[in-house]
Amino acid sequence: MSAELVLSGVLFFGLVVLLPLIMLATAFLGPRAQSAAKNEPYESGIKPMVGRADQKFSVKFYLLAILFLIFDIETVFMLPWAVSLRELGLSGFIEMSVFILLLFTGLIYVLSKGVLNWR
Amino acid sequence: MNQMDLIELQPDETFVLNVGPQHPATHGVLRVKMTMDGEYIYDAETVLGYIHRMHEKMAENRTYAQYMPNMGRLDYLSAMAFNHGYALVVERACGIEVPERAEYIRVLTVELNRISSHLVWLGAFVLDLGGFTPLMYCFDDREYILDLLESITGSRLTYCYFRFGGLYNDIDEPFIEGTRRFVKRMYKELKMYAKLVTGNIILMKRLRGHGIIDQNMCQRYGATGPVARGSGINYDVRRNEPYSVYPELDFDIPVDDGCDSYARYLVRMEEMVQSLRIIEQILAKLPEGPINPAKKPKIIKPPPGDYYAAVETARGNFGIRLVSDGGKNAYRLKLRSPTYSNMHLFDEACRGMLIADALAFMGSLDLVIPEMDR
Amino acid sequence: MELSLLNAFIAVFIAIAFVGANAAYLVWWERKGAGFFQRRPGPTENGPWGLLQPPLDGIKLMTKQLLIPGGVDKAIFMVAPVLAMFPALVSFVTIPFSSSIQAHTIEVGVLLIFAFAALGSMSLLVAGWSSRNKYAMISSIRAVSQTVAYEIPLLITTITVVLIAGSLELSEIAAAQMGGIWNWYIWPFQKSAGFNIFMPISFMIMFICSVAETNRAPFDLGEAESELVAGFHTEYSSMGFGLFFMGEYANIVIGACLITILFLGGWACPFGDLGFFPFTHHVGWFLLKLYLIIFVFVWIRWTFPRTTIYGLLNLSWQYMIPLSLFNLLLTAALIKVFA
């Protein structure tokens, strides 16, 4: 009961009240001057020319993002295992070793495929 | 070197990124229009003209003496060498003899100025790479040089110290003492920089093998100074076209054929040591005597003709071509400033680089914008 | 019921106040530290030793114009800074400062911190994307790929410690290291770790990953000012920037707290249980270790130049992740053998 209470308290107090309040305070306290030049996105003092910033962006990190997803999900599997390793006995250890070795092999395979070749 | 073929080109996904004129990496108002493919540079174009002040045209409607202060406004970091170049060409044109003491003091101040210029470069370069602290150390050391030069020239940055045939002011005992103390201090500081910066693993990884310019490219673009010497070209105006008292001094021209940013870095660091050696020698054998010639024309009016002089500034070969029609003003004065040539390497060399490497490479070229955009 | 609600709010309020004060005064601490490393005094003008600098900075930021450039996605643009500060606030609830000082004991404290750290990197992405600025866009992509890459070794190393302590609860992990400096998990040949020789390496991985996770120099590629001007907060002014700034420092405190608890014994006194001495196992020890680690963070920032994005990602994927995976497996095997 109280764990949820604390968290919702923080959520309410932090996210819903305090931080937006700080943002709002600046809107009231600060000046409100507007001009065309002021509203331009910054690009070293030049009007942005070819290409908008929200266009299709050639991302070299796409494969890394996929890799991350795989690894992050698999590490989550390890957490409950880590807590209860001492109770699991030998089979628990061997099963997880196989799992980690598989992960490891996958990583080596991906690296050998040249995901990290930058140049 | 050209990594374009390794990058899968998707022309509809490139975009133009303006680096400059208001960008921390360009150290001034240089603008680089980069066509980017993700983080890779597909094409780059440097755009000049944001700080153009028509220095060459100014020479045509000012007397020779009046034009002297302009020399401090070109390269604000090594103004002394620019003073020297201009004084040299006018002296050659008018046939004015310079007393020996004045020559030694000229070289002394130029070399001090060269060290201060390299110190600013070092600080700014490491700042480009993301290390802030060396900048503070460098400016601390540079402060000593500025104080010294201020005590004899009256200004701290845009010097106008040289006169045709001599100097504005003689150096005094406190200046010589201060210079001796500075040389001692600087050797210690250089050791510290070697520990803090040169041997740093991150720095080496970022500089070694990046920003490669080969000899051929240097020659095509007319690159001089530490940029050319970092590519293994043994060319230094002080040695190849000697002027002033440089032939009487014992110093080495550091050359490194690594061709990468690290080679240029090492060359500049070694140049500081060589400048210190020159200063030590001059302090040891500074002759007595006047600092201005006994006989000197009241109004400088070079005979009609075409004259040229070149000096080695902190950034390379600075040449002045003076065409005189015999009047009080120059008919035409052409300035050949070193970074103008050095900079144009950038467009070609940075293709296919990542933006981080390209800006580190730009830092290693040691660009001073008011000097190329004069 | 009434009492627990009140308690909860008091605890939360204290946690927020601690984060706020820390975030503000770490800026002062960083600037003083930078001054120390750079042969200059740092802030001196406002108050003794410049101690009034942070609140005055806050007031200044508050009274600046909150500029929303044309073309940005307004709602998301405004939410991003809040999102940057908020996870740090929540994470603090789970941090045990001593056996008695903890806002709330949560059985999966470690998990909670990691979950909210991911939310923090989300704020960078959102900020960069909604800004409609090319620098911000590049920067946010970098920052996210970086935090993502370093989250894995960080998590795996944490699992190694969880394995040794046998608990996901931070206070229990710290409690398992009581009884003297030699019981801390940073040292090799711990009996509870099955005499694993690689524990210092685990600590190093954890430390480097914390630096990278908090986007600090030499891994501050998201805000590499010589390349990307100000990175993802290029378009932010006034308190929008202020919240990003505070959030960054709050995250540093979280990272340092995690290192302290996981490897340096939390509030444990380094001399073991002295009994007669009133300050064994005291919150003071925790804070001392915490600020020592933060000092090292500051030291590193003002010493090293920045790495590049490929060097950074290669370091994580080629060295950190295989090494931490290997260490996890080794620790598990050793525990099975010896314990």
Image (cartoon, coloured by chain):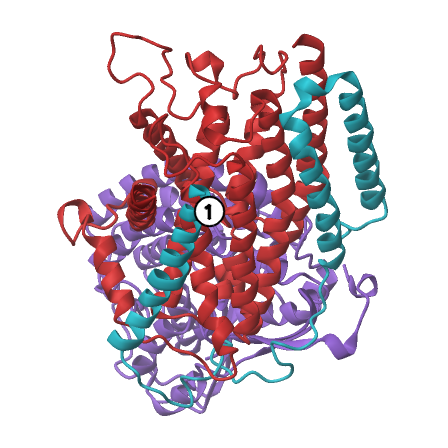
Chain colours: A cyan, B purple, C red
Give the residue number, with chain letter if any, for mark 1: A4
B271 left or right of A71? left
Which residue does the image show at 50% across and 37% down from the upper left?
C109
Which residue does the image show at 33% across and 37% down from the upper left?
B184
Give the residue type that dot 1 points to: Glu
Q: Quadrant of the C terminus of chain C?
A: top right
**Please, what secondary structure does the residue beneath circle 1 have?**
helix
Q: Quadrant of residue B80?
A: bottom left
Q: Nearer the viewer, residue B146 or C34?
A: C34
Label 1 packing within 10 angstroms: few (<14), some (14-19), many (20+):
few
Q: Quadrant of the N terminus of chain C?
A: top left
Q: Is residue B38 above or below residue B116?
A: below
Q: Is residue A44 above or below residue B196?
A: below
Residue C14, percent across and down?
Answer: 29, 44
From where the camera sits, is residue B315 visible?
Answer: no
Which residue does the image show at 30% across and 40% down from the upper left?
C36
Count of picture labels: 1
Q: Is residue C57 above or below residue C30?
A: below
Q: Nearer the viewer, residue B2 or B22?
A: B22
Q: Residue furthest front?
A: C1
From where the camera sits, is residue B373 visible?
Answer: yes
Residue B147, percent across and down?
Answer: 24, 54
Q: Nearer the viewer, residue C217 or B350?
A: C217
